[in-house]
Amino acid sequence: QVQLVESGGGLVQAGGSLRLSCAASGRTFSSLIMGWFRQAPGNERDFVAAVSRSGSNTDYADFVKGRFTISRDNAKNTVYLQMNSLQPEDSAVYYCAGSSRTWYGRRRYADYAYWGQGTQVTVSS
């Protein structure tokens, strides 16, 4: 089993930045593809970003490209999401997730077996 705990959410003004962290315990962290998803009220849970097991490959949803950066530190069992130039439409609960499946499915919600409890990000205009 893997336990994931997010932190770093909060309230920020438009144009500001936040850094989310997700600490993992349990199963070997480096064996998992790690992703970030987000869910706004009334919406589905959307893919935001993913990072490969080694950290050498990343993938981003179009709506965050150039603004968000995903990274991981396998020595610290932690994955990060640096969010810059935040806009009100980025407001959502952000979830980190872990997948033991292939990189091909990195954008698929169903490929992720492990989920954190979520952290709220609110961007004011």
Image (cartoon, rainbow, N blue to C red):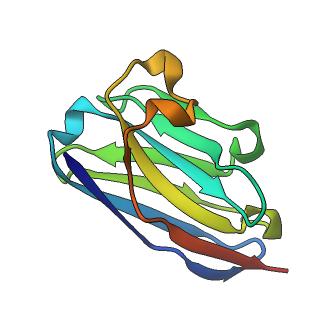
Where does the image place residue 29, in percent across and percent down from the top left? 21, 41
Q: Residue at x 19, y 45 (%)?
A: 1
Q: Nearer the viewer, residue 48 or 93?
A: 93
Task: Tell me if residue 102 comes above or below residue 50 in the rendering.
Answer: above
Please give the name of the residue rendered at 40% of the width and 18% of the height, measured from the top-left corner. 102
**Rendered view: 124 above or below 63:** below
Q: Residue furthest right?
A: 125
Residue drawn at x 60%, y 66% is 93
Q: Is residue 89 left or right of residue 76?
A: right
Taking 21 as reference, is 66 left or right? right
In terms of depth relative to the viewer, which is nearer, 19 or 98? 98
Q: Name the quadrant containing residue 39.
A: bottom right
Task: Indicate whether 24 appears above or below 122.
Answer: above
Question: Which part of the image, by quadrant, shows the C terminus?
Answer: bottom right
- Of residue 33 and residue 45, the one placed in the foreground of this image is 45
- From the top left corner, tell me how far across and down residue 46 is, in percent: 66, 45
Q: Can you give x and y, in whole percent of width and height, for residue 66 in the image?
A: 69, 44
